[in-house]
């Protein structure tokens, strides 16, 4: 069985190829994302798209992707699934769920977990209710376990994510201002105890000043911190 391939697209967007060849995209903000290389703005047809919350830089190009790839299935909270349905995405392509739920997607287990953030959807110049934000724990066919925290501050129940799911790699926002910065993310690393952390959601906007180098300095030998460039494959 092949290894899991993780490609950092930019900001909080990742494209993942599972050991059995399933393609998963998380938080597909691509076209207007200044961090995404031009060659990656159009992705290969995904099997599943996971959306952590309704902000434009995470919900992103979901509607456009659904139109371009009609077999793609979108996983999100219930409220976002209703909004996507109102944009014309067929009900058969939508899985609305909530924190605590786990799906089996062709042998890939996806659990929705808590995130400490907000979740409005920009719709026609107004913010509409988008339910609660979330993160995802994904267990691939070979048992490899990945945690995408979405947008969040540190919260002490990250220790429950550790105890329940034992993520091997954690994708954590570190930019500050809208999410936790390196100081808070270092505490998240302590709670999660994931051997490897991939820093995301930094430097896309001027306000997001937290750096992978600062996080690495704060955690020391506790875990390995990676700060991939957009387009890097891990």
Image (cartoon, rainbow, N blue to C red):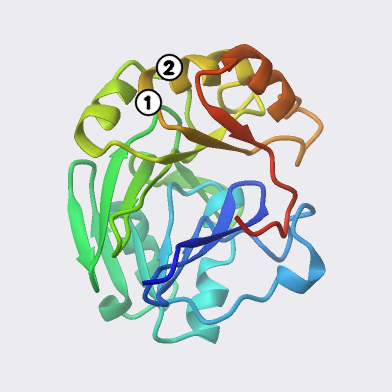
> Residue 18, position in %: x, y?
41, 68
Q: Nearer the viewer, residue 207 or 192?
A: 192
Relative side of 196 to 178, left or right:
left
> Residue 203, position in %: x, y?
77, 36
Depicted 70 relative to depicted 199: above or below: below
Relative side of 200 to 104, left or right:
right
> Residue 11, position in %: x, y?
66, 47
The C terminus is located in which quarter?
Answer: bottom right
Residue in view at x 29 percent, y 65 percent: 141
Depicted 37 relative to depicted 113: above or below: below
Task: Say which quarter of the image contains residue 114.
Answer: top left
Within-10-Å neighbours for mark 2: few <14, some 14–19, many 20+: some
Total tally of numbered discs in the picture = 2
Give the number of the disc on residue 192.
Answer: 1
Name the secondary structure under disc 2. Answer: helix
Q: Nearer the viewer, residue 73 or 21?
A: 21
Give the number of the disc on residue 98.
Answer: none
- Whether residue 202 is visible: yes
Q: Which residue is mark 2?
A: 190
Residue in view at x 24 percent, y 74 percent: 106
Residue in view at x 62 percent, y 20 percent: 181
The N terminus is located in which quarter?
Answer: bottom left
Relative side of 175 to 132, left or right:
right
Depicted 37 relative to depicted 137: above or below: below
> Residue 4, position in %: x, y?
45, 62
Task: Say which quarter of the image contains residue 104.
Answer: bottom left
Task: Say which quarter of the image contains residue 37.
Answer: bottom right
Name the secondary structure under disc 1. Answer: helix
* Cβ–Cβ under 8 Å for marks 2 and 1: yes
Residue in view at x 71 percent, y 24 percent: 210
- Whether residue 211 is visible: no
């Amino acid at each position: 069985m092949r290894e899991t391939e993780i490609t950092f697209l930019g900001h909080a967007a990742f494209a993942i190829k599972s050991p059995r060849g399933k393609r998963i995209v998380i938080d597909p903000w691509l076209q207007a994302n200044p961090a995404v290389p031009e060659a990656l703005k159009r992705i290969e047809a995904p099997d599943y798209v996971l959306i952590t919350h309704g902000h434009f830089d995470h919900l992103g190009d979901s509607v456009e992707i659904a139109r371009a790839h009609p077999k793609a299935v979108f996983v999100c909270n219930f409220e976002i699934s209703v909004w996507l349905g109102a944009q014309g995405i067929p009900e058969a392509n939508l899985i609305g769920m909530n924190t605590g739920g786990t799906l089996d997607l062709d042998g890939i287990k996806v659990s929705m977990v808590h995130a400490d953030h907000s979740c409005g959807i920009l719709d026609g110049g107004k913010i509409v209710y988008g339910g609660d934000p979330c993160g995802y724990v994904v267990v691939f066919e070979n048992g490899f376990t990945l945690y995408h925290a979405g947008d969040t501050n540190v919260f002490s129940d990250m220790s429950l994510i550790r105890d329940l799911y034992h993520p091997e790699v954690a994708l954590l926002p570190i930019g500050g201002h809208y999410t936790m910065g390196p100081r808070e993310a270092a505490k998240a690393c302590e709670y999660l105890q994931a051997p490897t952390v991939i820093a995301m959601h930094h430097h896309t906007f001027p306000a997001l000043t937290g750096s992978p180098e600062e996080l690495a300095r704060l955690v020391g030998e506790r875990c390995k911190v990676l700060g991939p460039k957009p387009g890097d494959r891990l």
